[in-house]
Amino acid sequence: MAQFNKNTQDFLNQERSLFEVYMQADRYGEIFDPVGQGFNGDLFGRVKVSNAYTIFDSTHRYSQDGDFDDVVLGVGSTVGIITAQSTATLGIGTTAGCSIIRETKRVFPYQPGKSLQVFQTFVLSPAKTNLVQRVGYASSENGIMLELDGSQLNIIKRTAISGVSTTITVPQSQWNRDTLDGTGFSTSNPSGIRFDITKSQLMFTEYEWLGVGCVKVGFVNSNGKFHTAHVFNHANTLDSVYMTTASLPCRYEILNSGITTSSSTMKQICVSIQSNGGYDKLVRRDFARRTTLKTGISVTTFTPLVSIRLKPGREDAVVLPRGVKSVVDSNAGVIYELALIRNATLSNTEALVWENTTSENVQQNTDATTMSGGTIVFNEFSTAANKIGGGLDIEALYNWDLQLGRTQSKVSDIYTVAVRSITGTLDATASIDFFDLT
């Protein structure tokens, strides 16, 4: 059996092969060591394993997924849905400057020591001059995206470590694992597969951040095999982190850098974001609270007691409500409803005052006198008599769907603890506790 020299990337003479042994190795000659002294085994010979823990998923079965924020510019730019295909559509006209930027309202928590894996399925609009399309796990400042600029296919890295976001562009011809250009079973295209950008794609990106880890970008082909196209390597090469953070949103961009010959439509299908090995960060429960009773709460109308939002400048913090506690005072058996409401409009006769909480990333408000709109997330009905307390126990650990989000213009979600009387009037106070996983 011929022996392979990984340094010369060639086989040794057959006569120099002294024995045969089966080993698994990649095309660079690196031996896989599933058990033992390698990274895939521990010091006692046990195989290391990890289970995928889903932090976020998105589909568009019957309507637009409400987890996204869209910035739509230009004549003919519209966001739609094809229900028969369970697909969202991002369509723009032909005018220069038309664009749609779609981004999740939430950023997704990266836990050091666990790889964060992102799957995205999509169909790009056919390539044309002056049309730019991007899909990836990124903000306007940091992250990794697939880019189709005209007919040029790239993988780009955004980084804001200097204080200003810059973009590093890697064209398809320079992808260092597989160019997927269909040139054959060569060193640059070991799979022999041609990446057909006109067809639906399943892209994966996997982040080993720790500030200086690597990032894999690749695609799943029609027979279900994973093919890594490019790896960004950073350890032992940079004198800083490679991105500001790995806690980022999912993002889609379609725009005209100039006039195009026809309108264009990108299709967004599904997203899944997973932490390999689970997510088990333990933190204290912070809280926001009202320290006085709000008196004379009336029938049928919700009255705000205490609200929280992400602190300005900290809109990419990861904050999840945990529970609500309340005290309701009445001399009779008044029936009331306690609720946690998302994105109600708060008002006062003067400007609302937002104050710091026990977390440096969250602010609270207790001086709002009225509220309108919003979505009830949790509620309970109870009877008040002589300061009997009530509360809402949301989750023992983390409910990611309740994470405080923000728009692309950095407007934070607001959660409000509110109460309304159903019979009679009452006085009440409340607090909300939350996890700050930033």
Image (spheres, helix red, strand yellow):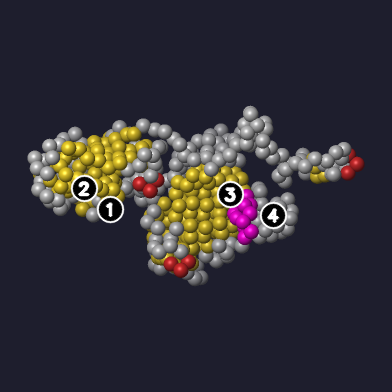
Q: Upstream in the sequence, badge 1 or badge 3?
A: 3
Residue at the bottom extreme? 262
Q: Secondary structure at mark 3?
A: strand
Front residue (pair 434, 317): 434
Q: Nearer the viewer, mark 2 or mark 3?
A: 2
Q: Badge 3, how many Cα within 10 Å: few under 14, some, many 20+?
A: many
Residue occupied by mark 3: 217
Give how far across and how far down residue 372 sits, in percent. 21, 53
Image marks 1 and 4: residues in contact by CB distance under 8 Å: no
Q: Which residues are magenta?
A: 217-229
Q: Secondary structure at mark 2?
A: strand
Side of 209 where 91 appears, left or right: left
Q: State the mark number for residue 191.
A: 4
CA distance separating discs 2 and 3: 50 Å
Image marks 1 and 2: residues in contact by CB distance under 8 Å: no
CA distance separating discs 3 and 4: 15 Å
Q: Badge 1, how many Cα within 10 Å: few under 14, some, many 20+?
A: few
Task: Name which residue type carries label 1.
Answer: Thr
Image marks 4 and 2: residues in contact by CB distance under 8 Å: no
Q: Upstream in the sequence, badge 1 or badge 4?
A: 4
Front residue (pair 407, 417): 417
Residue occupied by mark 1: 375
Residue at screen point 62% across, 31% down: 42
Front residue (pair 114, 331): 331
Residue 319 shows in this picture: no
